[in-house]
Amino acid sequence: QHHLALSMHVFMHTSPFEPNFHSASDLVQLPYPTDDTREIVKLARATAARLYQPGHAFLKAGVGLVNICDRKHHQFDMLHPGQTERADQLMTVIDSINRAQGKGSVFMASQGTSAPWYMRQQFRSPEYTTQWAELPVAHCHTLPCS
């Protein structure tokens, strides 16, 4: 989408209904504004490893990119030019392959090749403002004239 992330939020927590509730989170500044998935995954994994505490049954964990800016309006630092042109080209190639071959055709190896879990979505909000298939259907029945 031609945007760069400047920071990320990493969080994890146990069930708030359990007696040993534990929550940890951190807002991490990226070394430079980037859309390089490799850099984002590397920093997210390092942050999660630092936040993780053994002995807890974590119920939820996540990573969110925050402080996002439009690539064409961002002014880079003179001392650190930001992400390399090679990284830009690689991310462009990955995006174009995933667009042509389907989402997830090319992915980071750290994701693994099988997804043993699935996100629970039974309480997900409808997406009728962005998905044609989720538009509500209205049925109109006509009554006979008397």
Image (cartoon, rainbow, N blue to C red):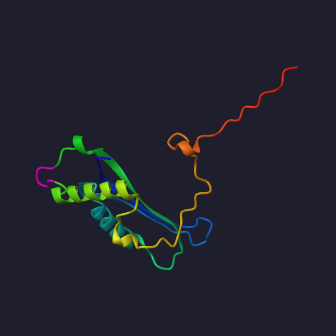
Q: Nearer the viewer, residue 131 or 23?
A: 131
Quarter of the figure with residue 138: top right
What range is drawn magenta here? 77-81
Which one is nearer the viewer's eye here, 27 or 101?
Answer: 101
**Quarter occupied by the C terminus:** top right
Q: Find the residue positioned furthest to the left.
A: 79
At 30% from the left edge and 54% from the top edge, which residue is drawn? 96
Q: Look at the picture and state if 121 lies above or below 55.
A: above
- Front-lying residue, 108 or 143: 143
Number of numbered discs: 0
Q: Is residue 50 visible?
A: no
Q: Is residue 130 left or right of residue 3?
A: right
Furthest residue toward top? 146
Q: Is residue 56 visible?
A: yes
Magenta stretch: includes residue 73: no
Q: Residue at 38% of width from left, 63% of height from top?
A: 105
Answer with left or right where residue 58 lies relative to residue 111: right
Q: Main secondary structure of the magenta part?
A: loop
Residue 90: quarter of image: bottom left
In the displayed structure, 66 sits above or below 60; it is above
Q: Residue 113, position in %: x, y?
A: 42, 73
Within the image, what quadrant is residue 27 found in?
A: bottom left
Task: Name the residue: 33% across, 48% down.
Answer: 67
Q: Position of residue 69 (x, y in %)?
A: 29, 45
Residue 112, position in %: x, y? Answer: 40, 73
- Please tell me which residue lies in front, 122 or 47: 122
Q: In the shown orientation, is residue 85 left or right of residue 101?
A: left
Measuring from the top left, give residue 80's x and y in whole percent: 14, 55
Q: Work out whether 130 lies above or below 45.
A: above
Residue drawn 11% across the image and 54% down it: 79
